[in-house]
Image: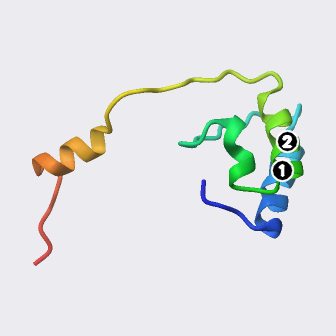
């Protein structure tokens, strides 16, 4: 997720709020939910993470990037001619 202005943060909140307790939703980010207030206004970050984390199953991942390792090794890379 990139830093979001007020309009983008409100749009993201509206999506999460519309799905809250009605639909499943999956969100991936390299920012921990506790840090969402660094990329959107604090009030919207708090409300959004509250809805995201209620009933949530968190799947933290750690380790090196497989994409980076493959790119550095030249695997899966097709030269542009």
Circle 2 Cα neighbour tier, 10 Å, few/some/many (<14 / 14–19 / ≥20): some
Locate residue 21 relative to residue 31 in the image: left or right: right
Q: Residue at left 85%, top 42%?
A: 46
Quadrant (top left, top right, bottom left, bottom right) of the C terminus = bottom left
Locate residue 50 relative to residue 3 in the image: left or right: right
Instruction: State the count of labels.
Output: 2
Q: Position of residue 21 (x, y in %)?
A: 89, 31
Locate residue 63 relative to residue 34 in the image: left or right: left
Q: Residue at left 64%, top 23%?
A: 58
Q: Which mark is residue 7?
A: none
Q: Position of residue 74 (x, y in %)?
A: 11, 51
In the rendered view, tell whether residue 81 sits above or below residue 24: below
Decide if residue 43 is in sight here.
yes
Q: Quadrant of residue 23?
A: top right
Q: Residue at left 71%, top 63%?
A: 4
Q: Residue at left 83%, top 50%?
A: 42
Q: Are marks 2 and 1 in contact (CB under 8 Å)?
A: yes
Q: Which residue is mark 1?
A: 42
Label 2 sits on a secondary structure element that is helix
Using the numbered discs, state the Cα–Cα distance from disc 2 to disc 1 in whole angstroms.
Answer: 6 Å
Q: Which residue is mark 2?
A: 46
Locate residue 22 relative to residue 53 in the image: left or right: right
In the rendered view, tell whether residue 62 sits above or below residue 7: above
Q: Position of residue 67 (x, y in %)?
A: 29, 45
Q: Quadrant of residue 35?
A: top right
Q: Position of residue 33 (x, y in %)?
A: 69, 37
Label 1 sits on a secondary structure element that is helix
- Given residues 15 and 33, the one toward you in this image is 33
């Amino acid at each position: 997720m990139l830093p979001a202005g007020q309009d983008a943060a409100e749009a993201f909140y509206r999506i999460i709020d519309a799905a809250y307790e009605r639909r499943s939703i999956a969100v991936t980010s390299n920012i921990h939910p506790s840090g969402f207030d660094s990329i959107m206004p604090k009030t919207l970050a708090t409300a959004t993470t509250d809805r995201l984390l209620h009933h949530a199953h968190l799947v933290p991942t750690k380790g090196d990037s497989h994409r980076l390792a493959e790119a550095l090794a030249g695997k899966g890379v097709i030269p542009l001619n």
